Image (tube, grey):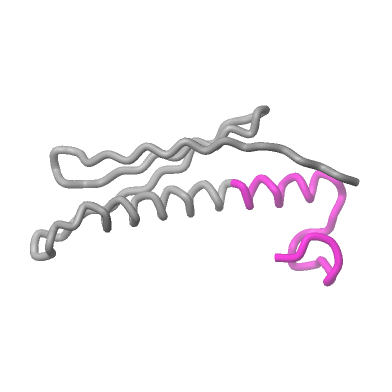
């Protein structure tokens, strides 16, 4: 059973007037779109390194999106009659 798909991800990163870096990530699967959000704020006592804020905000948006995907997968696994995650054996969809 061969299966190939292409999902597209768009990531926008911007800094607002208060110094908060925000990331907005959109995953387009072709049939659905999910959005992840993340932010980072430089402490006033820290050196301002924009790349670090970008990395933190993008990482947090990615983590948000990843958790949404895992939640959807768990729901879909249950919808096809698989037992809940704690009741699964070593076969099937491992964590």
Horizontal relation, residue 14 to residue 38: left or right? left
Q: Which residue shows up at 87% across the image and 49% down it? A: 81
**Total numbered circles:** 0
Q: Position of residue 79 (x, y in %)?
A: 81, 44
Horizontal relation, residue 10 to residue 66: left or right? left
Q: Is residue 45 magenta?
A: no
Q: Position of residue 18 (x, y in %)?
A: 14, 43
Horizontal relation, residue 18 to residue 26: left or right? left
Q: Which residue shows up at 21% across the image and 52% down it? A: 50
Q: Position of residue 74 (x, y in %)?
A: 71, 52
The C terminus lies in which quarter of the figure?
A: bottom right
In the picture as drawn, the residue positioned furthest to the top comes out as: 31
Magenta-colored span = 69-95
Q: Which residue shows up at 8% across the image and 65% down it? A: 45
* Residue 86, image quadrant: bottom right
Q: Which residue shows up at 61% across the image and 47% down it? A: 69
* Residue 56, image quadrant: bottom left
Horizontal relation, residue 14 to residue 79: left or right? left
* Residue 33, image quadrant: top right
Q: Is residue 89 magenta?
A: yes
In the picture as drawn, the residue positioned furthest to the left comes out as: 45
Q: Is residue 5 depicted above or below 61 in this figure?
A: above
Q: Nearer the viewer, residue 81 or 45?
A: 45
Q: Position of residue 23 (x, y in %)?
A: 35, 43
In the picture as drawn, the residue positioned furthest to the right comes out as: 1
């Amino acid at each position: 059973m061969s299966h190939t798909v292409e999902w597209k991800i768009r990531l926008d990163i911007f800094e607002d007037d208060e110094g908060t870096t925000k990331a907005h990530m959109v995953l387009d699967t072709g049939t659905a779109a999910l959005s992840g959000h993340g932010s980072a704020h430089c402490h006033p006592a820290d050196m301002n390194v924009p790349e670090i804020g970008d990395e933190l905000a993008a990482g947090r948006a990615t983590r948000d999106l990843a958790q949404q995907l895992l939640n959807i997968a768990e729901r879909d696994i249950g919808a096809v009659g698989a037992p809940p995650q704690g009741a699964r054996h070593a076969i099937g969809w491992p964590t």
